[in-house]
Image (spheres, grey):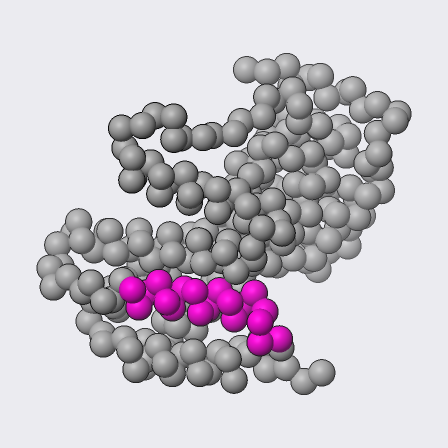
Amino acid sequence: MSSRRSRSRQSGASRISDDQIADLVSRLQQLIPEIRNRRSDKVSASKVLQETCNYIRSLHREVDDLSDRLSELLESTDSDSAQAAIIRSLLM
Amino acid sequence: MKTEKNLPRNPSSIKTRFAVKFLQAMNKMNKRKNPSTSMAVKYKRYQFIRAAATSSMASAVGPRRAWSRAVLRKMRNHTAIHRFPMNNKTRTTRRFPITRRKRSSILRGNPRQEDDLGFGQEDDLRGLVPGGQGMDFCRLLSETAHYIKCLKTQVQVMTNVLHHYST
């Protein structure tokens, strides 16, 4: 498709330093339960990205699953009173 | 600061805004209650809830994040397409040419890890995060972190709603 090998063109005038990127990667690492406990020098950036992708996919699946269960529940419930209770509990 | 796990610290936090919008959407759906329980209707209901969750979250975040802007944009385009299905010009997909993407050098050192070129993960990530195609790598990482936090909040609130409905 595209020339993916042209990546070696990191110009010296680039404003984004590797340190900045390393910092962002380590912040991502903190968010992912799989690798949160490992120290950053043991986990490569590509591993962090890979686990990030896996984690996002699993979160999407969870949302899908919850939507499915909610839709089944809505079929059979009168929701108004339940909603009032939920909103109250969330906003308290 | 003492905070309970399920309650937001700040009343106008993203979590609360999302919860309110999501519940409003569910309420709207319930108003047009359809007694039929055919598979098609069930699937539509599921799709609606899922879309309501996504759009409520993006709306709660607002335009301050690139990923939420991308979601809101897609929703507007989607609505326009459905209102004017004959008009092909309504569809606006912004695609940035691949050459504009700045490859990260931090991946350079790991070319043959679990994936072929070391770029697979970056591309995958761009595909998963809304609006990820046009960003530079630094922005992509920052947007991803926020996106993940919001997804976790979304799952948390939806789970709470589900528990309230089922008890």
Residue farthest to the right? Answer: A12
Q: Residue at x 43, y 73 (%)?
A: B160
Dividing the picture into quadrants, the one containing residue B100 is top right
Q: Residue at x 52, y 42 (%)?
A: B70
Say whether residue A21 is left or right of residue B114. Answer: right
| Dominant secondary structure, magenta | helix
Residue B123 point in image, percent of width and height:
58, 32
**Nearer the observer, A39 or B98:** B98
Residue B52 point in image, percent of width and height:
38, 56
**Residue segment shown in magenta:** B10-28
| Number of numbered callouts drawn | 0
Say whether residue A89 is left or right of residue A85. Answer: right
Classify the position of the C terminus of chain B by image quarter: bottom left
Q: Is residue B152 above or below residue B69?
A: below
Q: Is residue B100 covered in magenta?
A: no
Dividing the picture into quadrants, the one containing residue A37 is bottom right
Residue A32 visible, this orientation: no
Residue B48 point in image, percent of width and height:
31, 54
Q: Is residue A88 above or below residue B55?
A: below
Q: Residue at x 46, y 83 (%)?
A: A89
Q: Residue at x 69, y 34 (%)?
A: B136
Residue A16 point in image, percent of width and height:
81, 36
